[in-house]
Amino acid sequence: MNQPNAEQTADREQVPPPPRRRRWLTPLLMLVTFLSGGIVGGGTVAKIIETRVQEAIHHPERMPERVAARLTRRLDLNGWQQAQVLEILQRRQQELFAVRAQFQPQVEAILDSIEVDVSAVLNAEQKARWQQDASQFRERFTPPMPK
């Protein structure tokens, strides 16, 4: 066996040791990536749900067709069944509109009184912001009266 000479031994001693591996960096980056994906995905789902709810609130006349189409897919309805289900949903929706028309003025009156009561305890700047927020809330979440 050859013994290393003094020159080879000196070269080995001058070679720096390999840098320490950062074993925590990879899992940390994976965690950050996972959490970022969860946040983006959650925000996307929330926006989709909000959009669908807004559509249902502001266009209730579309709901019988959408529900009938969903039931047709889900229950494998034939053409006759689908037509009957659609007719039932449209008729019952008219009944719901009639009930809503009866109670909507009471709901509006309560919302009006909430706005007035809260405004009474606010300063001018807060009152302006509150009225804007209340108006936006009504616009977004209070469906218009059916025709």
Image (cartoon, grey):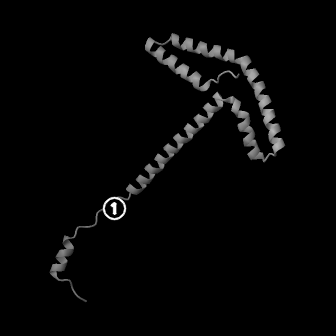
* On screen, residue 23 above or below 60: below
Q: Is residue 67 left or right of residue 12?
A: right
Which residue occupies the extreme bottom position in the image? Answer: 1
* On screen, residue 104 above or below 87: above
* On screen, residue 40 above or below 21: above
Residue at 54% across / 22% down in the picture?
136
Q: Which residue is mark 1?
A: 21
Query: Which SS class for mark 1?
Result: loop
Q: Position of residue 64 (x, y in %)?
A: 74, 34
Residue at 52% across / 10% down in the picture?
120
Q: Is residue 24 left or right of residue 132?
A: left
Residue at 22% across / 70% down in the picture?
15
Is residue 24 visible in the rendered image? The answer is no
Q: Position of residue 16 (x, y in %)?
A: 23, 67
Q: Nearer the viewer, residue 89 or 30?
A: 89
Q: Nearer the viewer, residue 79 or 46?
A: 79
* Amino acid, disc 1: Arg
Q: Quadrant of residue 84?
A: top right
> For the image shown, how many numbered marks are present on the structure?
1
Q: Quadrant of residue 59?
A: top right
The quarter of the rendered structure image containing the N terminus is bottom left
Is residue 19 visible in the rendered image? The answer is yes
Q: Position of residue 81 (x, y in %)?
A: 83, 42
- Other-residue count near label 1 (Cα within 10 Å), few / some / many at <14 / 14–19 / ≥20: few
